[in-house]
Amino acid sequence: MAMPQNSTRENGFCFTQPLNFSCTSPRPGEAGRPFGAMSARDDCSTPLSNGIASSGAPSPSDSCAQPLCAPAPAEEETPLEEGVKYVSAEGEELACGWGGFTPGCLQLCNTSKGVLFFLCVASFLQGMTVNGFINTVITSIERRFDLRSYQSGLIASSYDIAACVCLTFVSYFGGNGHKPRWLGWGVLLMGLGSLLFALPHFTTGQYEARSAAEVGVCGGNQSLPCSEAASSLSRYRFVFMAGQFLHGVGATPLYTLGVTYLDENVKTNYSPVYIAVFYTAAILGPAAGYLVGGMFLNIYTEIGREINIAPENTLWVGAWWIGFLGAGAASLLISIPILGYPQRLPGSQRYIVMRVSEAHQLKDGSHQKASDPDFGKTVKDLPRSVLLLLKNPTFIFLCLAGATEATLIAGMSTFGPKFLESQFSLSASEAATFFGYLVVPAGGGGTFLGGFLVNKFKLRCSGIIKLCLLCTVFSLLAIFVFFIHCPNMPMAGVTQMYDGSALPGGHLNLTGACNAQCGCLQETYSPVCGTDDIMYYSPCHAGCKRVSENLRNGKKVYHECSCIDKALLPGFGKAEAGKCTSSCVKKPLLLCFMFVVILFTFLSSIPALTATLRCVSDRQRSFALGIQWIVVRTLGGIPGPIAFGSMIDKSCLLWQDQCGEQGSCYIYQNSAMSRYTLVAGLVYKVLGTTFFIVACSLYKPPPPESAPGSSDASENGTSGLQEHKPSLPAEEDI
């Protein structure tokens, strides 16, 4: 059976004579040998994959002038076990290893499953660090380094700023280069960023938390000297921003080149599942970060030092830095095996040949330019590549839809724990743990389920966009839950007067008749909960005169509190250190609908990513993901935390007073926080829904008759292989 002639191209095939698939019969004793175990000199030794076994024999490219299956010379065989090497049809090394060190045991990992495992570990560490630990410790860092919410939002946005700077360069050149090396060096930089982020803990002095017991109760306060060193701590935000910048640079290849590397090395049908598993690991990472980070926050930041305040105290700063040390070391280790992978996995060429193009068809036919094997290999093609993507309306509106979703995800992931902390009157560690319990099933489950649905129903590009639209509509309806909010716990002098009346004109007044003689300082914020279920700024502001310790929970108990005595018998007013426990009856409903919003938001993430990969040409996939991430981060990831931080600052009722300078916020107004969140959520969800509708309506799929051969394949002269290729041996794909 003859086939058309072709020259050596991207796909690794080289034919100068008609292809002859009439192989000679196997030699005696070889009838039962599997296909993959044939030696380099066996009959039909050149399979239609890009990885073959060779052992001292001429490379497949040396025999391009011979028929595909030629009779073997009568020479003794070289056993496969001696010097086995994976090479592509172009002589490219496909063995797993570092340079010349390619031990046989490593080849067990030289599969799509092996790559998936290491990339999942890398994405897990990235998610745990950037979207888990950092969001968990935001409140502690604000308290420790005297930062405001917009400054911590800028720290969070530094990650996306770095990614925007690097995305074009990495996705364009890395997409046509050695992807595993780009990925490995990126993970290495990510580890260095984590270590740098933890550095301020070791370069600053010890944290001094002045509790009310140390300063004194009513009548025992002493003046607190203003320390110049304390006011200069906010400069460490630049170190945090530098660490985040390295995180952004390192993670850039992970979600562009990593996704396309997986997509290129598995069957098209299995690609959404592989990508879903990869992104599920990236979602479980933040969840683990919230849970583990919450546990670390229960450890005092100065390990080994005794302190007489509890984690519930707002002056408490937990060991925020431990997680970054562990994640940094793990990232450095995991980068080593990733650096050892080949540019293409053995056997992956068959999937490229069999791929069906679903790229959006431009009216002028210019999309076919990207099918040229030499396209995109030089800087000269960069403007043409950008132009082709800009002329693709489906791609553009998918990018805009992703940006709207990213704004909400970035804002809520950064300040979600703070939202729960304020609404339900929780400590920072409790809020982080609570948020982790929401993200694990909702975010992780939604991400995996999205990829599973695409694979289960064999959705094409148009159907995938419709699925994204459906998920966005459901999450839009669920976001109305932010009409609901839990009322603030009453706090004397902040939400009400000491006698229970409303504050005149909404102005704070921490001094009342019951504590006027105590000489309380506003610099000493240590809230206590009175037996009247009202919070007080400090034991001094509650008029408490004695202190003891509760043997059951170790909390401080204050007695003879004059401001509490008004509603009780004289001398029996008591208060306990920490915030009052919220008994909000709307808590289950609020948490339930927050779960739905997170679930459907993440449910559309993998389908949207899959639609992006399919609506562009195969050779532009890495670059398209890079451009999409630039749009998503520029319009969503960067302004998201900053905008949410500014909104949350507007809902602040009580600011920290640092020697006349405004510090971090102590108390937020819950109704205002919910109102701002609702407005932002509605705006971005409506925009996202609109963008998905436009993307679906403008998508123009390839003509049905061209689908089997794919425009890309036909340009390479391989479309006929769909019709005439010989049967390939069964191979485990997933």
Image (cartoon, rainbow, N blue to C red):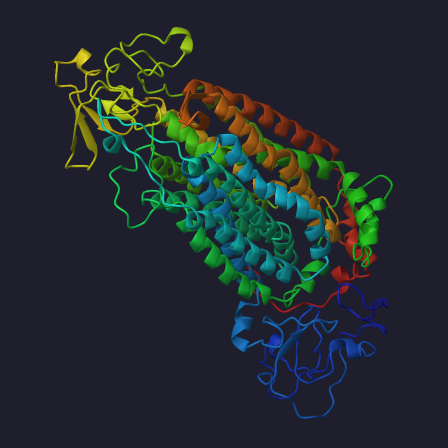
Instruction: Classify residue 88 by image quadrant.
Output: bottom right
Q: Nearer the viewer, residue 554 or 274?
A: 554
Does residue 70 appear left or right of residue 590 in this picture? right
Instruction: Classify residue 81 by image quadrant.
Output: bottom right
- Percent position (x, y) of residue 205? 39, 45
Q: Vertical placement of 513 versus 403: above or below? A: above
Q: Nearer the viewer, residue 565 or 449?
A: 565
- Percent position (x, y) of residue 602? 53, 38
Does residue 615 appear left or right of residue 208 in this picture? right
Q: Nearer the viewer, residue 166 or 315?
A: 315
Picture residue at 61% right of the left edge, 32% below the top: 404
Picture residue at 40% right of the left edge, 35% below the top: 227
Determine if residue 397 is in view.
yes
Does residue 16 appear left or right of residue 112 in this picture? right
Determine if residue 474 is in view.
no
Q: Nearer the viewer, residue 498 or 459?
A: 498
